[in-house]
Image (cartoon, rainbow, N blue to C red):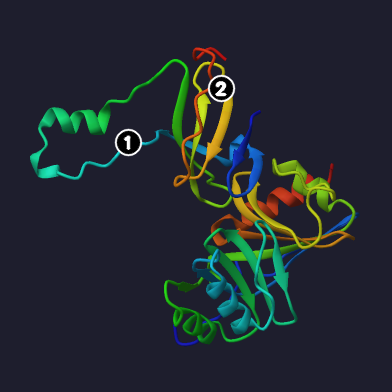
Amino acid sequence: MFIINCPYCGDRDQTEFSCHGEAHIPRPTETKKMTDEEWGDYVFFRTNPKGYHRERWLHDHGCRRWFNALRHTVTDEFVASYKVEDPRPPIPDNGGQS
Amino acid sequence: MDNPVKATPLEMAAIDVDGLTVAELGLVNKINLRGDFDSHACNSALTELLGMECQLEANTYVSNSASTLFWLGPNERLLYTDSDPQSIAERWRANPGTAAVDVSDYSTVLRLSGAKTRAVIASGSPFDVHPQQFGVGQCTQTRFGNASVLLSNHADTPVFQMQVRWSFARYAFDYIKRVADYV
């Protein structure tokens, strides 16, 4: 069991949340000029790191707000959770090895 | 229908066993209010509309004789009211950047009381309902079994309210009924 910190509600059980993939992927603005390859990158390709990862989370069973979290994909360590409009917390300086 | 009958999903079903009493509250007028509640103007407009102080901390509620106002999110409140919901909704919508939706029939409210109340809720929910964590005046949205619920603490005796979606009402009620025998 993980405890995840919702920026609005505080510490809650992981079963109240769902994860929705990588965060900070800007929606394209010049869509008419994009090539198929650029569309493919936007829709399908993700960084998929082994290490710290910024991702979008939803507090489904709670306040139903979206927020971002910085999580380690191997150790599942949650470094920080932050509101969408907040500055990104720094990645811990340990070479990506928690 | 010529003669529409107002009904609740559980038809006022009740549980009354040793240490636990559960009753469905019946028809409760509920309005979902949206607005920028971080702003002073928005809060004072609501305070004026409801005649009570409406500045809310996260996961708390306030009530007076006619209304109860729950925090649902930073820009979302839920109002139970004995007054005419339509007129309140219209008056709230007159404020800029707001929305009001009558959600009276979206969910039903169960009132749980008795010594086993906390144990029954803890059996289905990951949320900590210990008195030190969840006192009178607090509310939270959480999970009960597989149902999303709005829990609120109304008295130390204890008295809890559980608001559950209409379509999950029977599920939550049956869940409570089963665990009440062995918690």
**Residue located at (56% from left, 79% from top):** B45
**Residue A88 falls left or right of residue B160:** left
Q: Residues within 10 Å of mark 2 (few under 14, many from 20)?
A: some
**In the visual, does B147 lie left or right of B156?**
left
**Is residue A84 found left or right of A9 in the rendered image?**
left
Q: Chain of mark 2?
A: A
- Hey, which quadrant is residue B27 in on the image? bottom right
Please count the marks in the image. 2
Relative to the observer, which residue lies in front, A94 or B159? A94
The image quadrant where one finds the C terminus of chain B is top right
Disc 2 to disc 1: CB gap under 8 Å = no
Residue B180 in view here: no
* C-alpha gap between disc 2 and disc 1: 21 Å
Reply above or below: A82 against B45.
above
- Quickly name the residue at label 2: A76
Residue at numbered disc 1: A25
Residue type (three-letter) at the residue carrying disc 2: Asp
- SS category of the residue bearing label 1: loop
Labels 2, 1: front one: 1
Q: Which one is earlier in the sequence, the residue at label 2 or at label 1?
A: 1
- Locate residue B136 relative to residue A18 in the image: left or right: right
Q: Position of residue B81 (x, y in %)?
A: 64, 79
Q: Are marks 2 and 1 on the same chain?
A: yes
Tell me the amino acid under the disc marked 1.
Ile
Q: Position of residue B34 (x, y in %)?
A: 49, 68
Quadrant containing the N terminus of chain B in the rendered view: bottom left
Look at 16% across and 30% down and name the residue there. Answer: A38
10 Å neighbourhood of mark 1: few (<14), some, or many (≥20)?
few
Percent from the top left, x then y, of residue A4? 61, 35
Residue drawn at 42 percent across, 71 percent down:
B97
Residues B37 and B160: in front is: B37
